[in-house]
Amino acid sequence: MGYPDQRFDVNLSILFTELPLLERPAAAAAAGFTAVELWWPWIETPTPPQAELDALKKALDDAGTQLVGLNFYAGQLPGPDRGALSVPGTESDRFRANIEVAADFAASVGCTALNALYGNRVEGADPQVQDALALENLVLAARAADRVGAILLVETLNKPESPLYPLVGAPAAIEVVDKVNAATGLGNAKFLLDLYHLSMNGEDLSQVIKAYAAKTGHVQIADNPGRGAPGTGTLPLERLLDELKDAGYAGWVGLEYKPGDRPSAEAFDWLPASARAAG
């Protein structure tokens, strides 16, 4: 048990960001990791030129890294946005334009998990209208994910840092997961369980794990306070990951933390080098 018993991947949208995108897979590989994940890398466009998609695929392949998680287009992230799919108008249209692009790219690199960030509440928009739009778009995304053999992830964020995001408790995200699965009949919508966000919400992490491990498709970690590497805060992350494993979760654990004021390559000293390459 413990950290060496997990399958870790590095989120290249929060770690190694001191490097250009196409250099990050090789940097992760040099640090000993064989699996990575990404937020949608092209925050300005849901439909980047094919040449840019091909270049990212080549960078992943050349580094020998497997992409295990990818966000759909989510607006300005990092930045003020927290997704696009529930935002009426242009942003929803951009999300829809991205669905098949992201799914096809995931298929091209063997990525089997696509994360759809819900989006913020918008002033002047009826929350019920936003939720209906969200379900419509999530159904489209779930079908696209299923077409390429992937799961669709729905993520809880935290209220202090994302006050306009409506899914700020595990039950809220689970409710959306259940609605999507009921609408599609595919069963491929899953919960993205982020221990940092849940802890920021003050949730009972052991209870969340016990209740929702069976519906969890991906896990992300950072310590709290500070969103730094394990050991920089007070979360018992090693014990919590053991609890997840005991509850039947055997998937990926994404390292989605800030390296602090040191190079990203130095932010993994909590994890033995022998435990970094995913088996």
Image: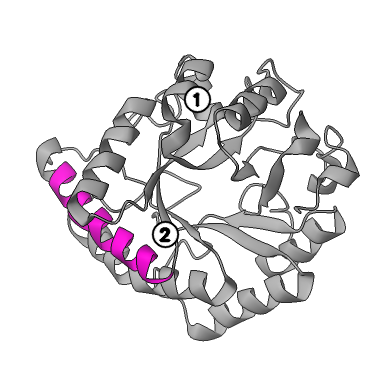
Residue 165 is at least partly visible in this image: no
Q: Considering the image in quadrants, where does the C terminus appear?
A: bottom right
Which percent across, then down, holds residue 190? 40, 45
Residue found 46% across the figure and 76% down from its top:
48
Say how the picture is coloured: one colour
Residue 54 is at least partly visible in this image: yes
Q: Which of 100 and 166 is in front in this view?
A: 100
Q: Which residue lies furthest to the bottom in this view?
A: 51
Residue found 76% across the figure and 58% down from its top:
34
Question: On the picture, is 210 further left or further right than 242?
Answer: left
Residue found 73% across the figure and 54% down from its top:
18
Is 156 above or below relative to 92? Answer: above
Amino acid type, residue under disc 2 in the picture: Phe
Q: Identify the secondary structure beneath mark 1.
A: helix
Q: Identify the secondary structure beneath mark 2.
A: loop
- Quickly name the residue at label 1: 209
Question: Which label belongs to residue 72?
Answer: 2
Q: Is the magenta stretch mostly helix, strand or loop?
A: helix
Is 124 above or below relative to 140? Answer: above
Q: Which numbered disc, 1 or 2, marks the residue that appears first in the sequence?
A: 2
Which percent across, then down, holds residue 132? 13, 47
> Within the magenta stretch, is there residue 94?
no
Q: Residues within 10 Å of mark 2 (few under 14, many from 20)?
A: many
How far separated are the C-alphas under marks 1 and 2?
25 Å
> Within the magenta stretch, is there residue 137?
yes
Q: How crowded is mark 1: few (under 14 residues within 10 Å), some or many (20 or more)?
A: many
Q: Which range is magenta?
A: 130-148
Question: On the picture, is 74 further left or further right than 194?
Answer: left
